[in-house]
Image (cartoon, rainbow, N blue to C red):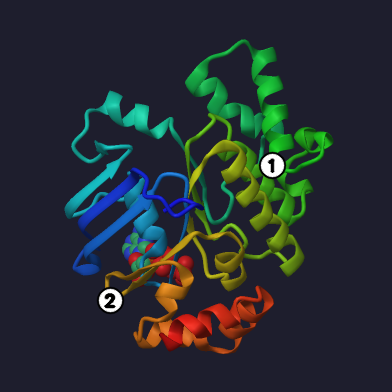
Amino acid sequence: MTENGSHTEKVIEVRGLKTQFGDTVIHENLDLDVHQGEILGVVGGSGTGKSVLMRAIIGLKRPSAGSIRVFGVDYLEADEETRLGVERRWGVLFQAGALFSSLTVAQNVMAPIMEHLHPPRALAVDIAAMKISMAGLPADAGAKYPAELSGGMQKRAALARALALDPELLFLDEPTAGLDPIGAAKFDELIVNLKRSLGLTVFMVTHDLDTLHAACDRVAVLAEKRVIACGSICEVRANPHPWIQEYFGGVRGRAALASKGVGADAARQEAQ
Ligand SMILES: Nc1ncnc2c1ncn2[C@@H]1O[C@H](COP(=O)(O)OP(=O)(O)OP(=O)(O)O)[C@@H](O)[C@H]1O
């Protein structure tokens, strides 16, 4: 759904997904849709397979069953050229940032630009500077090495790199983990602003209840190897599953709800 409530095309369509490591099954019969222009927050207990799901969708973990369509392309069945074409339309921010420590921030952002677009170097420098600015970093951050930046700035640098190829789809794995609440709130705001200004679709793994309320249009809950609930926060909160009730109804869940001033709406919805 978009902000005005209309249905849009599916950017990601996962059906009957099964993943496993050896005999350990992580996902089974998992279905999930991500619609164009939305920020989908993926939550679930530790070890339920949120990161593995993201890795399966971006082709880093081969499923043992099921299908994954991205931009309408059956990604698992596609030939290499088609897959590369799809991959160029997304950007990924991994949990630990995954910046090259021996490269400056600008060089990190330039790396995918040089690899995929082969522009003249001066143009790549200009594009990298623009992405660094879009990610909310000061211009002088480009000349710094990742180790010289704070945790929050490193996340922004990793975001600048994820934006390098003008993606339509952004994958974020716990983008606010390790940030203080103010830094996390600013990062949420940045993601929402980028979504609005660039028309991005965002798949975001998160534990952060504040992020869910501040940034996400819909929430998917992983438990029992599949998506057990997916919808607006109000819709998902109404699900009686014990994990969902504990997550949203616990002290932190209620605090996040109250701080967004939506307690009355949620209570009303629950009463219906
Ligand atoms: N390379 C791997 N080899 C074997 N098992 C793995 C591998 N990667 C992940 N797993 C297992 O898959 C399960 C899901 O891991 P995943 O990292 O997706 O969980 P998560 O929901 O993202 O957890 P968290 O919220 O703690 O980050 C875990 O039990 C984990 O140990």
Q: Amino acid at mark 1?
A: Ala
- Ligand 1 quarter of the rendering: bottom left
Q: Residue at x 67, y 33 (%)?
A: 131
Q: Which mark is residue 178?
A: none
Rounded to the nearest angstrom, the CA distance separating label 2 from label 1 is: 36 Å
Residue lying farthest to the top in this orientation: 120
Crowding at mark 2 (Cα within 10 Å: few <14, some 14-19, many 20+): some
Rendering coords of residue 154 (x, y %)? 69, 49
Q: Residue at x 44, y 88 (%)?
A: 271
Q: Is residue 109 left or right of residue 212?
A: right
* Callout 1: SS: loop
Q: Is residue 119 left or right of residue 75?
A: right
Looking at marks 2 and 1 on the same chain, the residue that comes earlier in the sequence is marked by: 1
Q: Nearer the viewer, residue 33 or 101?
A: 33
Image position of 235 with respect to 105: above or below: below
Residue behind mark 1: 135
